[in-house]
Image (spheres, grey):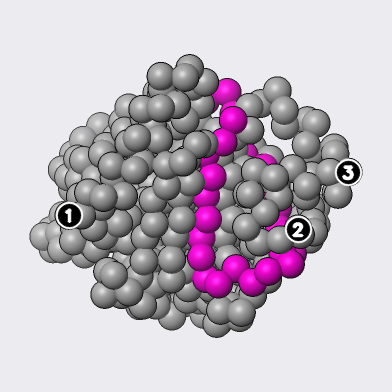
Amino acid sequence: MAHTFDVCIRGAGIVGRTLALLLARERLRVALVAPQRTEAPQADVRAYALNASSKQLLESLRTWPDAAHVTAVRHMEVHGDVDGSVHFDALAQGVDALAWIVDVPALEQRLAEAVRYQPQIEVVAAPVEAPLTVVCEGRASLTRAEFGVDFAVTPYGQHAIATRLRCELPHGQVARQWFSPQGILAFLPLDGADGHSVAVVWSLDHSQVGHWLAAEAADFSQALADISQHSLGQLELQGPRMAWPLQQAIAKRWCGAMPGTTEGRHPRSWALAGDAAHNVHPLAGQGLNLGLADAQALARILRTRDAWRSTGDLKLLRRYERERKAGLAPLGAAMDGLQQLFTRTEAPLQTLRNWGLRSFERSGLLKDWTVRQAMGLDR
């Protein structure tokens, strides 16, 4: 393979590998920076809720995981802390599924295999020179800091705890979420239509995280059973617990000239994508969908550029920045508003938010529009 590249991607996670495959499909030469691991990987209990747009993208790259690692969500239930609730149904939307719950390791493996067999991609251990460098290193990106990008972070004072549970009752392909005084709890169905396992994301006050990470398995499972109103019967912890702090964040700039260079006929530029560019609260499960949308938008803009334009042309990259910031803003504001509303304990706000859930459940067209936006449709 030639050792000159059109794009260097720093970060070989899901967004980075997806972008590499999209660009390689357009015959661009891609260097994918994936430093060698020095320690054995830990068990990953995370699962992603992917929407129809993300599914179509991954299927087009032939990287959608096998059926054993994907569970279609036919119904969603969102419960308030009193009597408010909202229900979404795939049949009512005229679709097969509202979302698909995907095992993280299975998706990463499919992407890694596709990269391995794509001759336009070379996996490298360190960054190389290219007209365009795309930073996909995640929320703690060192390259973003190296480039002097202001990353405006709003901490939520919460952590998310992720794990897996074995349930007495089958999940019925229902994704469930509870807003409670003990935090925001989500159960995502796993193991297919008849599965009894769920992926857990529990967002709770940071002061409680240490206690629940160290708690006995039976006590931890009982706490989740209580919050979930015993909707799936007895619960049994089925995997390790992992935690991370929650925040909303957005980079002030998503592109620019590489340090030490100026705009010219042969520019060298950078752009951000995925969690390196933005973070949202996981309560709607949209984080990876947004990152994949970044990759798809950037690849499309580079694909449709004039033949004489370099991949590092800042006019193109600023178009990408404007498009993705505009797409992110409504969802980010909505997730931040919901998080702020449901972490307040004042009685008037409790009444207001549950009234809001009941009103939204009866809203008809607004409810339909919202769910189709979350599914990646009608955009």
Q: CA distance from mark 3 to mark 1?
A: 46 Å
In the rendered view, tell whether residue 340 sits above or below residue 272: above
Toward the right, the furthest residue is 216
Q: In the rendered structure, does residue 56 fall within the stretch colored magenta? A: no
Q: Are marks 3 and 2 in contact (CB under 8 Å)?
A: no
| Magenta region, residue range | 156-181
Q: In the rendered structure, does residue 164 fall within the stretch colored magenta? A: yes
Q: Indicate the amino acid at tag 3.
A: Glu
Question: In front of the other: label 3 or label 1?
Answer: 1
Q: Position of residue 355 (x, y in %)?
A: 34, 35
Residue 171 in view here: yes
Residue at 25 percent of width and 32 percent of height: 262
Residue on which disc 3 sits: 216
Residue 6 in view here: no
Which circle's residue, 3 or 1, is located before the other in the chain? 3
- Callout 3: few (<14), some (14-19), or many (20+) C-alpha neighbours within 10 Å? few
Q: As rendered, which of 315 and 67 lies closer to the eye?
A: 67
Q: Are marks 3 and 1 in contact (CB under 8 Å)?
A: no
In the picture, measured across the screen, residue 316 lies left or right of residue 133, that is left
Residue on which disc 1 sits: 365
Badge 1 element: helix
Residue on which disc 2 sits: 235
Q: Which quadrant holds residue 50?
A: bottom left
Badge 2 element: strand
In the rendered view, tell whether residue 1 sits above or below residue 219: below
Q: CA distance from mark 3 to mark 2?
A: 13 Å
Q: Indicate the amino acid at tag 2.
A: Leu
- Callout 1: few (<14), some (14-19), or many (20+) C-alpha neighbours within 10 Å? few
Q: Indicate the amino acid at tag 1.
A: Leu
Q: As rendered, which of 77 and 308 lies closer to the eye?
A: 77
Which circle's residue, 3 or 2, is located before the other in the chain? 3
Secondary structure that dominates the magenta span: strand
